[in-house]
């Protein structure tokens, strides 16, 4: 550290929210040699559409380099392609209702700038995707957790919470939900719950933020309409991404909703829209019509890996570990028996070279030591079998 003659410390200059921020915790796994990690929902690199992205990049460099490589707005064709995809899902979409960002995570992270004063109530699911919810916490939101079961958010519990707040004269700012192939539980909210949720949003005047990161990756069951497509009164902000269907490294996500929200999100997106080059490349790729075929390939492959993981769990895990079968997405959520702590299991599993996300890292309120999340998306089929065998041995030897 540099020596200083000053009586002051730089860190005292930090804003309250930067002073109190906790560094990310990765558990013990980084100090151990992990042979199989089920911890993170990474895409499988085997499935990246390398050749098509290379062809689109070459075409952009040959034909659009003067604009794609200069300062400037994203490709107008990318807006068009995203609008077409949204409209095909029955979502009202046009240029004024759409913002594109560096991943959906970036846009979700801007929500507090638009909606939250310190102490304002924001409602989230428990468990949820903490990567986003931690931004709400950092912004000083009073984050309230509504339980999730195998049908997604418990909307009756939500109704009670909204009614209690109303009695106290409090109007929550927004409800953050992942209704389809939920991260981490894999659950999908059925239509009747979606309708009730929308009714509550209108009755209590609360925005619903629908995070549909995994919605295109359905392995089984009928498509359930998105909240945004069911919403007739404008209470839903729909957020999605190319990360799970093209590649996370392209960093392109979007939000679609009330133009007044979109306009303000854009104002707080201080670096401007997304990079022109990547936007031109992805627009060209989408315009070939190949993305929908690619999504079908992804579905087949992820479905295979998910089935393999579940079969391996059925063979290797004690029967009192209950795995939820997802209808799509990247994750299997396992409920542990009462005598096993997810944190303690992680420590023991790390000793055997295997890792996962403990449920505690999926709750904003400290719960979750009774469950673990296994991401099947990234590992090879061989590694899935190896990892579940290792974890099964740890579980069977427990106690
Ligand atoms: C539920 C959910 N929402 C949003 C994101 C962020 O995705 P991106 O910022 O890559 O678009 C993720 C990433 O894992 C996610 O799981």
Image: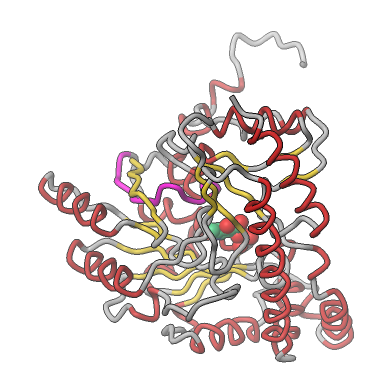
Stretch in magenta: 119-131
When the figure is inspected, residue 90 is found, relative to residue 15, above or below; the finding is: below
Q: Is residue 31 visible?
A: yes
Q: Is 171 within the magenta?
A: no
Quadrant of the image containing the C terminus: top right
Residue drawn at x 74%, y 39% as measured from the top left: 354
On screen, residue 114 above or below 95: above
Pinpoint residue 316: horizontal percent, then vertical percent: 68, 46
Residue 271 appearing in the image:
no
Q: How many labels sit on residues? A: 0
Picture quadrant of ligand 1: bottom right
Q: Is residue 114 above or below residue 216?
A: above
Residue 121 inside the magenta-drawn segment: yes
The percent position of residue 16, horizontal first and vertical second, equals: 46, 29
Question: Left or right: where does residue 309 sit relative to residue 203?
Answer: right
Residue 254, image x, y percentages: 55, 70
Give the left or right position of residue 331, taking residue 89 as reference.
Answer: right
Q: Nearer the viewer, residue 397 or 284?
A: 397
Residue 191 vertical position relative to residue 167 in the rendered view, above or below: below
- Which residue is rendered at x = 36% and y = 70% of the image? 236
Tell me where residue 356 sits by quadrant: top right
User: Looking at the rendering, in which quadrant would you find the N terminus?
Assistant: top right
Colour convention of the picture:
secondary structure
Residue at coordinates 86% horizontally, 86% vertically from top-left?
59
Where residue 193 sits in the image (x, y, percent)? 31, 68
Residue ID at (25%, 52%)? 157
Q: Quadrant of residue 26?
A: top right
Farthest residue in the left direction? 167
Q: Nearer the viewer, residue 258 or 219?
A: 219
State the image quarter where residue 69 is shown: bottom right
């Amino acid at each position: 550290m540099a020596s200083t003659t000053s009586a002051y410390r730089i860190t005292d200059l930090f804003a309250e929210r930067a002073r109190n921020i906790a560094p990310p915790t990765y558990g013990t796994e980084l100090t151990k040699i992990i042979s199989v990690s089920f911890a993170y929902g990474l895409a499988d690199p085997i499935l990246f559409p390398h050749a098509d992205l290379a062809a689109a990049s070459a075409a952009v460099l040959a034909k659009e380099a003067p604009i794609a490589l200069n300062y400037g707005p994203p490709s107008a064709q990318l807006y068009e392609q995203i609008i077409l995809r949204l409209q095909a899902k029955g979502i009202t979409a046009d240029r004024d209702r759409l913002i594109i960002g560096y991943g959906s995570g970036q846009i979700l992270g801007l929500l507090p700038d638009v909606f939250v004063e310190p102490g304002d109530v924001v409602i989230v699911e428990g468990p949820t995707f903490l990567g986003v919810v931690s931004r709400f916490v950092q912004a000083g939101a009073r984050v309230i957790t509504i339980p999730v079961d195998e049908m997604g958010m418990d909307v009756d519990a939500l109704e009670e919470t909204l009614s209690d707040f109303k009695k106290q004269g409090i109007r929550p700012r927004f409800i953050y939900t992942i209704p389809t192939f939920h991260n981490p539980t894999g659950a999908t909210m059925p239509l009747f719950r979606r309708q009730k949720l929308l009714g509550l949003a209108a009755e209590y005047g609360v925005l619903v933020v629908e995070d549909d990161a995994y919605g295109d990756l359905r392995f089984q069951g009928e498509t359930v309409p998105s909240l945004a497509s069911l919403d007739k009164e404008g209470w839903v902000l729909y957020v999605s991404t190319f990360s799970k269907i093209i590649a996370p490294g392209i960093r392109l996500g979007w939000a679609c909703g009330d133009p007044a929200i979109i306009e303000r999100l854009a104002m707080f997106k201080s670096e401007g829209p997304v990079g022109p080059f990547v936007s031109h490349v992805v627009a060209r790729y989408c315009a070939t019509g190949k993305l929908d075929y690619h999504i079908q390939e992804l579905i087949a492959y992820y479905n295979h890996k998910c089935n393999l993981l579940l079969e391996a769990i059925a063979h290797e895990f004690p029967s009192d570990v209950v795995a939820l079968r997802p209808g799509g997405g990247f994750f299997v959520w396992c409920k542990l028996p009462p005598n096993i702590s997810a944190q303690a299991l992680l420590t023991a599993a790390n000793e055997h070279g295997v890792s996962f996300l403990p449920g505690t890292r999926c709750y904003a309120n400290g719960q979750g030591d009774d469950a673990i999340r296994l991401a099947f998306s990234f590992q090879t089929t061989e590694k899935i079998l190896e990892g579940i065998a290792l974890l099964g041995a740890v579980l069977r030897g427990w106690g």
